Image (spheres, grey):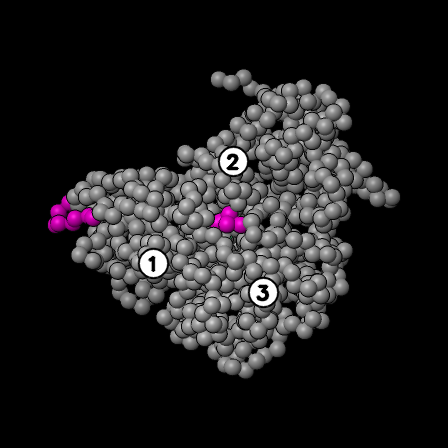
Amino acid sequence: MKRREFLTIPARSLGGSLLYTLAGDPVILQGQDGTVRVPLRFFTEAEALIVAAASERILPRDEAGPGASDAGVVLYIDRQLAGPYGRDRRRYIKPPFMASFPEHGYQGKESPREIYRAGLAQLAGFASLSNAEQDAKLRAIEKSLFFQLLRTHTVEGFLCDPMHGGNAGLIGWQLVGYPGPLMSHRDEIDKNLGQPWRRQPKSLSDILGRPVKGWEEVDL
Amino acid sequence: MVSGGTGSMRVPVSVFNNGDGVTRLVAALSLRLWRLFYRMPSGAARRLVPRASGVSQAGLIPDAGIIEPVVKRLKPVDVVIVGGGWSGLVMAKELVTRTALSVAVLERGPARKLAEYAAGMDEVDYNIRLRMMQDISEETVTHRHSTAAAAVPVRQYGSFNPGTGVGGAGEHWGGVSYRFDEHQFTMASHLRERYPAKALPENLAVQDWGVTYHDLEPFYWKAEQMMGVGGKAGNLNGKIVEGGNIFEAPRSHEYPNPPHKTNYLMAEFTRGASELGYHPYPVPAATLTENYTNPDGVSRPACAYCGFCSRYGCMIGAKAQPSNTLMPILAPKKNFQLRPLCWVRRIVHRNGRAEGVVYSGPNGEEILQPARIVVLASWTLNNTRLLMLSGIGERYDPATGKGTLGKNLTHQVCVGLQVFFDKPLNSFMGAGGLGMAIGDFEGEEKLEGGVLRGGGIRSQSSGDGPISAFGRIPPGEVQSGWGSEWKKAALRWYDRMGSMMFEGDHFAYRQNYMDLDPVYKDKFGDPLVRMTLDWTDHERSQEQFFVKMPPQQNLWVAGGSGRQPRL
Ligand SMILES: Cc1cc2nc3c(=O)[nH]c(=O)nc-3n(C[C@H](O)[C@H](O)[C@H](O)COP(=O)(O)OP(=O)(O)OC[C@H]3O[C@@H](n4cnc5c(N)ncnc54)[C@H](O)[C@@H]3O)c2cc1C
Ligand code: SF4
């Protein structure tokens, strides 16, 4: 059996509250300090460190607020790749594989897992580079399918329901002002026209008052 | 044999957005779509004889595998219905409530419960990974642009999202509930009357339907009552009513329910359209606008504008779905059986009569269900394929124009336009049927540039999840699609984009058709259906017509609140 891999991450990646100062600057309040060891499902620790560093360059923590690492994006991607999506459980994967027009979508043989494995192999040593060096490396591969997936998954992991492992502490939803999957907007839909309607967000489990599992947990 | 439901409730409607949030020029980029003869002598079912007609355009289809032996032979029923979507379950309801016939519906997907839908309010699993859709790894379709090209399979979903399970695509549809207009039923005669022969596109194969709008009007009305459609009539028995779609065909009744509430985007669309002299009206919606009890006695609550609508099932049953509108009537009936996880593979027939179907049951066993009547309600592509696999009908040959099976494949001509606003839209609120539209370009009067048929222009607020909404930035704002500058622009423009869609008639052409794919197979080893379809100059001119409408025709910009349109 494969040796179990862990990723050691700052505890803040597992939650935090986003507040704004009077000047409007975002501040992240953390409940926990120190680090936590999280078991990985698909990545090796070295791979996870690269993904964490690269997704942080895609969606960095900056003056505008938290970034990919604050939301635990790497854990989201790890779980997605370990689940049905990562192994192409629902893609039509019968041969022959032929190149075709872009409108036919991705026609390749490789699954998301395989695309990541190969892409990450090209980025060995990435995690220890400077920000500028990391950006240059990513710029060089930004047209690749691997990078496109990484970019898409970073946004997903930043703004997903926390049941999927990302958006820790609802930090992404707090940042954009998304209230979560509230059951009703009947009283608001035709009011406050042109005005933001913002609430402290809630996850689906919070709203339903019972745990909800993502697809990656039930269809392994 | 009855072949029902080769289409949908209303064929060319839907808000196909690719999940990446990009609706621009859907038409231009999108074709991303999107015999065995049983002998049944008395006694046990025997083995099958290989099918007779295995020749396709591109050559011989290797034998699709003989199903043998049939493990189980069931007691006959009167009617077997293939497919449990709107078409199949409406047919079942009519039969079961009005006759004593025994009816069995065979549905390849699972049964569903209302409770699952609340737990399904998740953007990743349902809007991005499309958890409710058909499992495309088992069976998909192939597409090529012309007979000269090789077809490739649709390997993952783009804009083309077939349904599965009890309720079919009717569970995760948007609830936008239009009728065809009068000319759409008699398109061939209409075009011939209106235009000289030389103005018509080459290879046009459009035919009149054979039924007219007026034949169907009472049934539209019946369906709208069943679903509880909300809207405002613009033509009541020939009387024009302002505030509705004044270009629509006459209705015998006002809608069963009033229109949806109006949000910011709709208010702006209405203002812009009115200033330009157009006639905005609320999109007709099967997402209930009020609590409602239909003539069958089925009650459903008003829509809560939760925004998890198209691609999701409704957690309160406000959106008309077969599961909440038809199943309450069907489930208690003694002469009705619903069998989920039953995948029909062949229609059994002899001497020109259907005698039942063979299907693969929940455990993969081959089962023969004899029936006096077989109804095909498995949706256009599946119905066609099932007939072809069963050796029924004459397959269409585009070279000679002979044959009807697979002929005249059509798609949707949809062109999207994005408009950016300075103020937030709260676009996470919404409903599949929520929106405004104009019908001013539906007829022919205002068309230019060789466009023979126009279409509706619509703006929907169907509910945007934060992932799809993030990163919608006006063109030219930032160079990169990632990094700090991009992130700041994405935050600045978050919740500021609305879209508008033109949806026009797609004509049937001689070269667009369906047959069986010679290479790719489903999970059983049967050939997939192959679509041969390409856009012609007419669809391109429809697209250009919409895209190039003079700037003042851009509705929101006219209204004063929107920014430059993005294509
Ligand atoms: C995301 C989305 C949004 C949409 N929004 C709108 C909208 O707003 N307005 C509108 O008018 N239309 C809309 N549509 C289209 C509309 O939902 C469909 O056209 C309509 O529901 C089709 O109904 P049907 O019963 O004909 O087919 P389906 O719903 O496809 O039902 C066919 C059933 O047959 C089953 N089946 C197939 N093959 C077999 C087999 N071999 N054996 C057993 N069972 C089989 C399938 O699993 C399926 O359940 C939308 C579609 C989608 C995908
Ligand atoms: S928007 Fe309305 S109809 Fe649609 S799922 Fe939510 S409550 Fe149901």
Q: Amino acid at mark 3?
A: Gly
Ligand 1 positioned in quadrant: bottom left
Residue A183 seen by the camera: no
Q: Say which residue appears at 56% left-offset and 44% top-offset.
A: B128
- Give me the residue at 48% from left, 78% from top: B252
Residue A117 can be seen in this image: yes
Span highlighted in magenta in the image: B30-44
Q: Residues within 10 Å of mark 2 (few under 14, many from 20)?
A: many
The image position of residue B344, as x and y in percent, is 31, 48
Instruction: Kindly tell me whether mark 2's CB lies below 8 Å from ligand 1.
Output: no
**Which of the chains bears the disc numbered 1?**
B
Estimate how packed mark 1 is, as few (under 14), some (14 to 19) or many (20 or more) residues with alpha carbons within 10 Å.
Answer: few
**Residue wearing tag 2:** A85
- Dot 3 or dot 1: first in sequence order is 1
- Which chain letter goes with mark 3? B
| Residue contact between numbered discs 1 and 2, judged by CB atoms under 8 Å | no
Magenta-colored stretch includes residue B96: no
